[in-house]
Image (cartoon, helix red, strand yellow):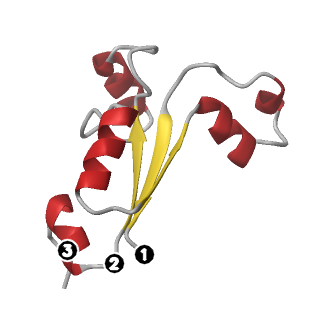
């Protein structure tokens, strides 16, 4: 039933869980350079989200649970046993998770 719907209409009809990558602000490579880097490894960069703006929009759309992980939180959660945990990046992208459930 929810297939093919746009993000603004989903929370009204469906239980939704969504995940986004965001740039984390203007503290990294330009959006064009970042898009080229991810394209080089086979990923498409579709939109450019700023973390604060994305959180505001998702909350306004009805997503009640929004979590934004910055670089240090990403390393702590997913790479705690890696060498990166010893010196997590102070800047970089974000992973945003939003849910209506």
- Image quadrant where residue 52 sits: top left
**In the structure shown, which secondary structural element does the residue marked by tag 1 occupy?**
loop
Residue 38, image x, y percentages:
40, 32
**In the structure shown, which secondary structural element does the residue marked by tag 2 occupy?**
loop
Q: Which mark is residue 12?
A: 3
Give the mark, 3 or 1, whose residue is nearer the N terminus. 3
**In the structure shown, which secondary structural element does the residue marked by tag 3 occupy?**
helix
User: Between 38 and 85, which is closer to the camera in this rendering?
Assistant: 85
Up the image or down, 59 lies above or below 86; here it is below
Q: How many marks?
A: 3
Up the image or down, 20 lies above or below 12; here it is above
Residue behind mark 1: 101
Residue behind mark 2: 15
Q: Is label 1 in contact with label 2 (beta carbons under 8 Å)? A: yes
Q: Residue at x 35, y 17 (%)?
A: 33
Residue 68, image x, y percentages:
50, 44
Q: Is label 3 in contact with label 1 (beta carbons under 8 Å)? A: no
């Amino acid at each position: 039933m929810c297939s093919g719907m746009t993000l603004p209409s989903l929370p009204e009809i469906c239980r939704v869980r969504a995940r986004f990558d965001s740039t984390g602000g203007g503290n990294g490579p330009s959006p064009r350079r970042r898009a080229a880097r991810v394209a080089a490894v086979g990923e498409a960069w579709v939109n450019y989200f700023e973390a604060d703006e994305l959180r505001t929009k998702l909350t306004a759309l009805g997503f009640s649970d929004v979590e934004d992980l910055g670089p240090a939180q990403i390393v702590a959660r997913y790479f705690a046993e890696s060498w990166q945990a010893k010196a997590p990046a102070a800047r970089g992208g974000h992973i945003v998770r939003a849910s209506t459930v």
